[in-house]
Image (spheres, grey):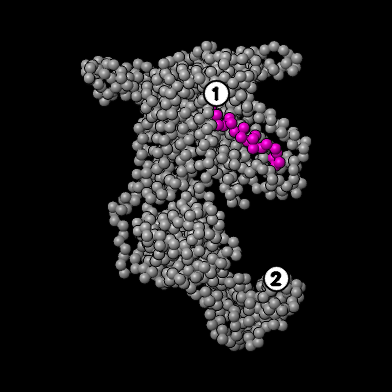
Amino acid sequence: MDALKATTSKNPIVRFLNMNTSGQTSGRSLPLWRQLLLQALCLAIFASVMFPIMYIVTLSFSSKTTRPSSLELIPKEISFIAYQQVLDKPTGNPVTFAELLKNSVVLSVGVGLAALLIAVTAAYAFSRLKFKLREVLMILVFIPLLMPAVGLSTPLYLLLNQIQVKECSKEVVAIQPFTACEGGAKGKLLFNLRDSLLGVGIAMTATALPFAVWNLKGYLDTIPKELEEAAAIDGADTNQTFWRIVIPLAAPQLAVTFFLGFIGHWQEFVTTWLFLSQPKDYTLAMTLYNMTGQYANSVPWNRFAAMAVIIALPVAVVYIGLQKQIVGGLTTGGVKG
Amino acid sequence: MSSVTYKNVVKKFGDLTIIKNLNIEVEDKEFLVLVGPSGCGKTTALRLLAGLEEITEGEIIIGDRIVNDVAPKDRDIAMVFQSYALYPHLSVYDNLAFGLKLRKTPKAEIIRRVNEAAEILGITDLLERKPRQLSGGQRQRVAVGRAIVREPKVFLFDEPLSNLDAKLRVQMRAEISKLHQRLQTTFIYVTHDQTEAMTMASRIAVINKGNLLQLDTPQNLYDHPNNLFVAGFIGSPAMNFFPAKLTKSGDKVIVETDEFRVQIPEARAASCKAMDGRRIVFGIRPENIHDPEFAPPNIHGEKVTAQVDVTELMGNETLLYLVSGKNTFVGRVDPRSHLRVGSQTQFIFDMDKIHIFDAETEEAVR
Amino acid sequence: MAIAKPSSRKVQWKKASLPYLYLLPAFLIMGVITFYPLIYQVIISFTNFDTKHLLLGLESPELKFIGLKNYIDIFTAALPVENFNFFRVLEFNFWWALSNVMLHVPVGVLIATLLNTEGLWLKRIYRAIYILPVVVPPLVVATVWTNIFDERYGAMNQLLANISTYFGQAGPIYIRWFEDVKPPIPGFLPGAPLTLAYYAMMIANFWLGWPFMSVVATGALQSIPKDLYEAASIDGATGGQQFWNITVPLLRPAMIPAAVYGFTLSFNLFNFVFFMTGGGPARSTELLVTFAYNLVRNLRWYGVAASFAVIIFGVAMIVFLITNRITRATQDYPEA
C-alpha cells in the first residue's frame, strides 16, 4: 500500500519524483546495446536542459563584468564578486538588496496568504454545501480566470490611481476621492495607492483569488464525502466539520496553493512594472528586468547572472522543502484499503 | 426505548424514486438486516435514518421521536461506513474520542469509554496509530469502536465488511453478532450479501427496486419466501425455477413443465386447485433434489429425469448441474453419490419442500 | 407520541444562509477588486480615457463617450501604431500557442516513455535534472534565454560557431535573432510572417515546455497497468505497436487537459515576448497580451487598452469554450 501511496499523490510533480525507479520489478534486463543507445539519448537531453542553466551559473561565478566571446558552460573560476556586488548595491539607485528582498517577500507572501485565506471558505462552500445560487456564483468567480493579468490590471491601475493622499497645506490632508483640498488647490502628493506595494498587492490578489478558489475547490472535491458524514453523525456541525476535518485534511493542498501563489508573485513583474515608479518599492524581479532592459549595453553581466540565480534559488529551495508535506497523501488510509 | 419505525417513507432524487412507500418497524434491541441487490435503495434507507439524506415523504421515528427534521448528531445514532471513513489526520484514540469531544464529554469519561471500546475490540495497542498504519481488519474495528464509544440508541452499519477478504469477513461477522449480544442495542445493518444477512440477523428485510418485499426471521424467509425475488435471492446456490402450468386431474394437482410432470402432495393440493390451468413458476431448492440411491425415506418423492452436466465435489456434499430438456438446474446431493458427468438418471424431487409462484404476480401460492 | 420539535424558522434560516456566509469574504473582496474593475473596464472602453483623465476618472469633465470607436479602430488597424494589424496578431497568437503545444506534447510523452524504460540506468538522476526547467521561475528563464540569443555574446551563436568548426567553418557566427525581419521559411504561415525571432522564442519555450508535459505523461504512464504490456507482448506486439496501441490511447485522457492547459499558457505567454523581442521585429511576434501591455504601459491610451482587454476577454472566452469541449469529450474512457 505504501508503494501505491507514493504514486497516487495529486501533484504530478510529486508523483514524478516518487515513482519506483529501482527497475527491480523488471522481468528482463535491457540489452546492452539498447541501454547504451538510450543512455546517449538521455545524455543529449541532459545537456540541452543544462545548457542555459550552466551558462548562467558560469557567468555568475565570473569576476569579469563582460560576457565571454566564446562559449563557456563550465566555470573557469569561482568568484563570488558578482554575488557580493549584487548584495551590496544591486542597482544604480540608492536602494539596498534587503529592501528589494523585503518588497518581494512582502508582496509574494502577502498575496499568497491573502488569496488563500479569502478563498478557502468559498472553495469549501462551492465544493460541499448546497445552496440555490451555487452554479451562478461559481461561474461568476471563475470568469476572471479567463482575463489575462494585463486585462485586469488596467482598470485597477486607473481606479487605484484615483485614491491619493495629499497635503494641501501644513496639517491639512485630503484623501481623494473622498475629500479634496479647498479651492481646488492641487496640494502635495503624499501617497498614491496605485504607486504603492499595497496597491500592487491588491491588483495581484485580484488575479490570484479566483485561481486559489478554483485550485482549492478541485482538491476539496477529492476529500471523501463519508468523512464529513461521519463527522456529522459524530456530532459536528458544518463549522466544526470545516475546521476540524476539512482544514487539516486540506493542509497539504493549502500549502501547495500558497506556494503556487508565492512562486507566481515572487517573480511577477508585469503588474509591478506597470504600477510602481519609485525605486524604493522595486522588487527583485523588477530589478532583474531593469538590468537587461534599457541599459543592456552597460550591464555588468556577471551581476545580472548572479541576480538571476538569487531569484531562482528560493523558488527551487522552497519547492524541495515542501515536498514532504505534499507527499503526505493524508487521505490514503482513512478511506478504504 | 430504541425502536425504529419507517412510516410510509418515500425518497426521490429529482424524478427518480429510490424508495417507494417503505414501512418497517424495528423493535428495541433487534438486529435487523436490510438486504437486496446493489442499487435497490437499502443504503438510501439507512442514510435516511441517519439523517444524511432528507426524506421526501413519510416519517422516520426513533424511540418515540419523529426525527424527520432532526440533525444527524441529535438522532442518537452511530454509523459504521462501508469505507470506514476514519479521519486520516487523527490517531485511533482521537478518532474514537472525536464525537465525545464534540459533545463536551468530561475527559475522564472519554478515556474510560475509549479504553473500554478498545478492549472490547482488541485494539488497545493501536490507539496511538494513524489509520493509514492499520490493516483493513484493524480499520474496520476502529470504525466499529467509534460507534461503540458513543453509546448510541441505534447502530447503523453500511456494508461494513465488503472491503475485507473472505476469511476476515467470516470472523468479523461473528464478532459483530457477539457485539450485538453484548451491547443489547438496536442494530440496523445493510448488506448485499445474503449469507451475511442469514447469519447475523434476528430479522431480515429484503428490498428490491425501492420496495420492501418481505420482512421476517431468516428461517421463515428461507422456508416461506413470499415471492419469486425473495426465493431467488435468499439461499446459495439459489432456488431452481421452472416455468410450468398447473392442471387438475381428479383430486390430483399436477405441475406440468415442458419436460416433466410432477404431482403436488395432498396437503398442498387444496390451495393450488384454484390455480387450475394457470401459468406458474415451480421452485425447488437444490438440497431437495436427491440422488435416487440416497433419497431419504418417507418423503413425497417425484421422479424427474435429468442428465449430469457438471459436478462440483465439496467434500461434505456434491453439487450437480443438471440438464433436462431446456431446463438447467442444480442439485445438492449426498457426497457418496456415484453420479458422474454424463450420467442420466431419475432424480427424486422432495415435493413437501416445493414452492409455487404465480407467474404473473410473482407472489407465492400457499 | 412526542413529536420532536421541528426546527424553528430561525434555525432553518441559519442553515440556509450558512453557505452564503462562507462565500461572503471572497465575494466581498472580489466585488471590490475584481468585479467592479471589470465593469469599470467595459465602461471606459467606450471613452477616450487617457493620461489627462487619470486623476478624476469618470468624473473628468473632458472625458467623452465615443461609442465603438476604440473597437472599430482596433479591428480596422486605424490606431496610430506602426505595423499593427489586429487580425495578424490574432492569427500569430493562435499559431504561436498551437505550434508550441504540438511540439511539447509529443516530445514530453516520448521522453517520459524513454524514462519509463525498465532497467534504464541513472533514471533517478535524469528525472531530477529534467524537471529543472519546471522549477526555475519563468522570469529568470526568459531573461537567461534573451541573453543566450544575443547577437554578439549570446551562447546560441557561440554554440553554433563551435559546431560549425567541426564542419570546417571557423570563425564567429552572428545571427541577428531578434532583428532579422526576413522570414527564414517564407510563406509558412500565410498572412503572418514567422521571423527568426519566432523560432528563437520557440526554442526557448520548448526548453520550458516539454518537461512539464513529460511530468504529466510520466504520472499517467505509471497508472497504466503493467500487465497490459505483458498481455500485448504475449499477443506478439512489438515495442512500437505497444506504444501506439496501449501507451498513446491510455495517455490521451491525461494529455488532452495538459495540452489544453499548455495552449492557454502559451497563448498568454507574456515573458518571452516581452523580454526577448518586445513584440518585434516589426511587431511580427506581438501577442495580444503584450500589445495590451504596450497600450497601457507605454502608449497610455487607457480607453483603447480597455477595449483591447474586452476583446481579449472575448477571444479567451471562445478559446475556453472550444478547449472545454475538447477536454470534456475526451475526458475519460467509460468504465470497462
Which amino acid, mark 2?
Answer: Glu
Residue B35, percent from left and from top: 51, 66
- Identify the residue under disc 1: C142
Residue A116 pos. (x, y %): 42, 38
Tag 1: residue type?
Ala
Label 1 crowd bin: few (<14), some (14–19), many (20+), radius 10 Å: many
- Residue B185 position, x and y percent, is 42, 69
In front: B158, or B175?
B175
Q: Residue at x 65, y 42 (%)?
A: A21
Q: Is residue C51 left or right of residue C126?
A: left
Identify the residue at image location x=29%, y=22%.
A165
Residue B312: assigned label: 2
Compared to A86, does B170 lie above or below? below
Q: Which mark is residue C317?
A: none
Q: Label 2 crowding class (10 Å Cα cut-off): few <14, some 14-19, many 20+?
A: few
Q: Vertical placement of C82 versus C42: above or below?
A: above
Name which residue lies at 26% across and 18% down: A167
Q: Which residues are magenta?
A: C117-138
Which chain does the residue under circle 2 lie in? Answer: B
Gap in angstroms between the C-alphas marked 2 and 1: 73 Å
Q: Is residue A196 above or below residue B170?
A: above
- Along the viewing direction, whichever of A68 and B38 lies nearer the viewer: A68
Closer to the camera, B303 or C216?
C216
